[in-house]
Each structure stands twice: as C-alpha cells, then as structure tokens.
Image (cartoon, rainbow, N blue to C red):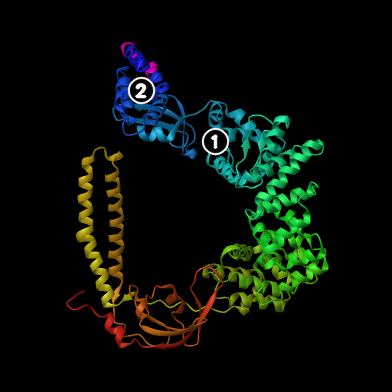
Amino acid sequence: MAETQKLTEQLNECAEREDFDGALKIVRENQAELTKVINAAGVKDALKKATKDRLLLSFLDGVEFGQRPVKESLFRLEKLVSLKEGALVLSKSIEWGLGKVKRVDYFYKRITVDFTRKRGHQFSYAAAADMLVVAPEDHVLVFQAADPAAFEIELKDKPGEFVKRVLRSFGGMPIQRLEDVCEKCGFVKAANWKSFWEKARAALRQDKCVVIPVKRADPIEVKASAENYGDSWLTAFSHETDPKLILAAVREFIAQKKFEDASGQVRDAIGDRLEFAITAARLVDDALYARLATLITSLGYAKPSAESMRAYLWDRKRFIKAAAALPAREVGNMVAFLGDTLESKLKLCAAVPEFCYTAVTEIVTQFAGIAECRAALAKFMLEPKAPATLTTLFTGSYQKYKDAWPELPPFITLLTHAIALGEGRQGGETLKMQNIIRRLFADRKWLENVFSWLSPADKALFFERFQASIAWEASTHHATVIRMTKIDPSLESHLVKAEKKKEYARLTSPRSFWMRKCEYLKLINEEMPANIKRIEFAKGFGDLSENAEYQYAKDEQRALMQKQSLMQADLEAVKASEFADATTDEVMPGVTVVIESAEGQKTYTILGEWDNNLDMGIISSKAMLAVKMLGKKKGDQFELPGTEGQVAFGRVVDILPISDEIREWMKLPEGAQI
C-alpha cells in the first residue's frame, strides 16, 4: 500500500510539472502495481493530468485504454509518440519503401506519411500503431536514403555484405522470401536476381556469422558472432536433443573445416549425437534419417552400421518417401548411399515409376555407365505407358542420351509417350512432368531439334499423332500445330482442317427460366432494399472511415449490384424453350444421350443453361460433361471430365428424344407466368 501511495505522489508531482514523459515512464515501469488499485481509465487520467498538449491528449484517446490490456495500450501510446513529424518510418507493406511522417493531425486523429512509392498516405491512429514503426538508423532503407552512392557500391561490389544488411533489417528469411523482399524494395530486378544471388551466396558461405540452410524453405540467419567451437560449444552440443539441430551443427562444423583436425573427444561426441539423432528420426522422419545416414557413413562412423541404415530405408520402400521430401542436392547422396552394389542399383532402377523427378534424374546420371541399368530403364520406355518422369527426362534431353544410350527405343516412341503425357488432367508429380512437356512443345528451338532428328516418315507420324490428340488444352494444341507447320512447311499436307465448333442458342426450360426470374425479383424487391436500410442504420455508428458495419454494408451493396447486373443480362440473353426443334442426329440441347465408359452405361438428358436435376439425369448444356458431348454423333468418342489423374474417355451409344416425364418437369408450375 505504501508503494502505491508513493507512486501516486510521484504521478501527482509529474502532473504539477506537466512532465508527461516522466509520468509515462512511471506508469510503464510500475503498471502491474498501479493496475491493482486503479483501472485502465485511472491510468489514462493520470497521464492526461500530466499534459495539456492536444496532440498527446488525442493519442491518449486513440489507444483505447479500457478496451485493450493496459500493457498493449501503453505500447501503442509509445509508438504514436515516436511518430513525430519528420520521423523516418517503415510500414508492413515493404513495397512502399521508406516513409517520412509529413503531418500528425490531432483533430482528425490522422498521421500522414510520404513513402518512397506512396505519397501522402493517411493512417488512423489505430492503423498507424498497427502498421508503422520508426526505422532503425542501420536499416537498409535508411542507408539507401542517407547515402545512395555507398548503397550502390555495396550492392554491386559486396553482395554478401548487402544481403547481411537486408537480413539484419528484415530478420532471417528463406531464399525465396529474400528474393521477394529485394525485388519489392527495388534493390535487385527479377531478371538480375540469379546472378546477384550466386555472387552473394559464394561470399556468405565464407562468412562464419551466416548460416545458410540446406532447405530453401528454411531461413538464412545472421549470428552476432562466429562460433569458436571451444569447450562451451562442445558442452552445449553434447546435450542437444533435436535431431535437426544436431545435423545442422555437425554440417556447420564440417563446413568450417574443423572436423579434420578435431580431437578424439570431439569426434566421439559428434558420433554419439549423430547416433542419438538417427535413432530419434527412425519411424518419424525418413528424409531426415536418410540425411543422417549419408552423413554418418561419409564421416566413417561405424555405429549405426551402413548395412542397418540401408536396410531401414529399403524396408517398406521408405526411400521413396524420403526422396520426395529431401532437398534436390541431397537426393543424389541418398541414391549413392543406397546403390552400393549392382543388385541395389537395379533395385533402385526398378522403383523409378514411384520416384520423384529429382531422384530419377540422379539414378539416370549416376548409373548411366552401367549397361544393366541402362537396359532396365530403357525397358520402361517400351511399355504402353512409360513413367512420366523418365518420359520427361529422355524427351527433354534426348540429344544428351541418344548416342550414350543405345538401349533406348527410337525417338518417335519417346515422343509418342510425351504426347500422351501432355493429354488430359494429371496430379502430383505427373502434373509437374506434364507442365514441363507442354513447355517443351511450346519451345520453337526444341521442336526444330526434334524435326532434325526424325526421318521424313517419322516427322509425319509425330505431327499426325500430335494433331490427333484431342485431350491437349485447345489453344495450346492449335498454336503448337501451327508452329510445327512453320518449322516444316511440308507438314501442311498432313494438316487436318478442324471443323468450326457449332454454337447453340442460349436456351433453358420454362420452369428454370421462371425460377431464375423469381430469384431476380427477390433480389431487386427484397435483398437490395434491405441492404439500403442496413447502410442507413450503420451511418449512425459514427466516422464512416472506421465504421466496420458501414463498410460491410457497402461491400454487400456492391456485390448485390454486380449480381443484379449479371442476372439482368442473363435474363435478356437466355430464352425459355421446350426444345421442339431438337433432333437426334447429334448431341445437342434437348436430347437424351446414352453413353458408355469404364463405369458402364449411363443416361443423361441435356437441356438448357439453367436446367439441372441429377436425380432425373438432367444436366445443363453448360455442364462440362455436356460441353464435351455437344456435336458428337452415335459411336463418337469424347473425353470425360474428372478431377486429378489420368484422362478417360466415353462413347456416345445412342441419342434419343426427351421423355414425357422430363417434358412434364420442364413445364411452368401451375399459375406461374414468365
């Protein structure tokens, strides 16, 4: 109680002297004691008594004492006090650049900031406390503004030091995030990033204060000082229990070239921790296990034995899952570790269809000199459906393999697999391979090479096979066909003129048209007037710029107006129809279609744009299945829509008139009018 009385007296003295800074310091340092006897409003009043400055008083009103914890309100108050006119500030939106406080308006409670790329931006007090921070003197953006010449010299001549400055300014971050920050801040253009980062990384790898992670997703860190690897390091390392940290510590120890000269005690400690780490990773993280296994073997430790670690990775094909999770440059280490004998190499080759692309590339590269492995891999390319990864690798780099791999089938066979891979919708690793293949086919230089390696007969076969592929994305397929004929004009004689896709009138059944019109009338007669009432009601809550209810109601109004515009346009464009003109010559709106696929026969009735009743087999003419069937005749094949996975096809078995039951469904409800 005596302590509280003393604090109260000190605050009263600050009030008499109008010493706001002194009062704020007392409150900040003794907030726990003060809040026991006075509430948040009392803290605010004590600070108000210590100043007559209108700006400070507006800050006290703006930090929401009583609505937030006292500690948070004090933090926000100190933030606002620091945002004086002329102060250099940073925003959470880093692409705006460095800012300078232009004006602090106590009447409207606004802070105006001129950013490098956004002049005159206004913040409410609440937004300023959330988004702004005074820029540290050593921040990279302050450095750029204070000394542009020195900034450019460091950026150009000392990229490693520049990256360290960025990391110290913005905190540790992954490489991808670092690239994003440098581009958004305008330090490095996207086209120049690769060369810049190569120079910076080379310098950073020599810097003992910088930790570059193995995984690109992990952050680069700048330490305050370099590790001297003395007794304190050994003691801390000997007690480390996190397998990932153990791995990182050992790798850093090796990178600093300390392992070669390490004492027996240090080597024993490293061996002990690595054995602990790989035991902890077992059955938990197969990728981490593989990384530890390759490291333990490379350092020459006998425990655990290489045989036992290989056996674990072979068991239940854990190496497949490990390869998919490993960083690209470490997959090769695992492949080399597992492929210690010819038998194990062939075993890895046999698992190629299950491997990720990176692992397949490593297997092909490392085992290319072994005839048995080449034969095993080439055999996959003779199967009706070759692995997507091998197809992508051999097709994209055929020039590299065509002479060194006599076991490979003819190039036209590889291209046939590539065309099939580009078709339809894929998923997972196969989708990645499909995207690579599609980019290859869009590369004129690659296509020119392809035609130079093919005989005239194979050129025609390749062109006709690609032209006949109905499951490529239409615009990409058309552009590639044209590109091929420009590379080799003789292929024009093999060009099949595509029939123009028939366009159908925009129709729907009377029932569905009436239902859509009812929705439109409800929108304009009920929903939009109700929204206007909500807007008027929300205006009563005060300042519109900070009025959440008002902003929400206005957002809703914009959405409703957009919906009204679209619905009105649709109602004007779509006509009600009973499809009396529909014929059964081909699939069109107003017919019933019997199709056959791998799942058996199914029957659908295709009606208009807004018709849908799955229980009766009615589908809209805009449904993907209907779009695929429109224009087809009896016996024609078409692609079935689906989700991820291999493309599937169906066949039109029969085309029939609409049944009486469905015609009854199409009619207007009794008493309804359009």
Residue 630 image offset from top left, x and y in percent: 43, 79
The disc at residue 34 is 2
- Asked whether residue 455 is in view, the answer is yes
Quadrant in which residue 149 is drawn: top right
Q: Is residue 506 left or right of residue 194?
A: left
Identify which residue is drawn at 34% across, 30% down: 63
Residue 254 vs residue 40, the one in the foreground = 40
User: In terms of sequence position, does the residue under pointer 1 or pointer 2 come before the other?
Assistant: 2
Dividing the picture into quadrants, the one containing residue 39 is top left
Q: Nearer the viewer, residue 260 or 94?
A: 260
Q: Nearer the viewer, mark 1 or mark 2?
A: 2
Q: Say which residue label 1 marks.
A: 170
Q: Quadrant of residue 492?
A: bottom right
Residue 423 location (% of width, % of height): 57, 71
Farthest residue toward the front?
1
Identify the amino acid type marked 2: Leu
Q: Residue at x 31, y 55 (%)?
A: 559
The quarter of the rendered structure image containing the N terminus is top left
Mark 2 neighbour density, 10 Å: few (under 14) some (14–19) many (20 or more):
many
Q: Gap between marks 1 and 2, in whole Å?
A: 36 Å
Q: Residue furthest left?
A: 671
Chief secondary structure of the magenta portion: helix
* Residue at left offset 29%, top offset 22%: 45
Residue at 38%, 23% (x, y): give it.
33
Asked if residue 15 lies in the magenta stretch, the reply is yes
**SS for tag 1?**
helix
Question: What amino acid does circle 1 point to?
Answer: Phe
Task: Work out whether 512 lies above or below 367.
Answer: below
**Other-residue count near label 1 (Cα within 10 Å), few / some / many at <14 / 14–19 / ≥20:** some
Residue 167 x/y as whole percent: 59, 35
Residue segment shown in magenta: 14-23
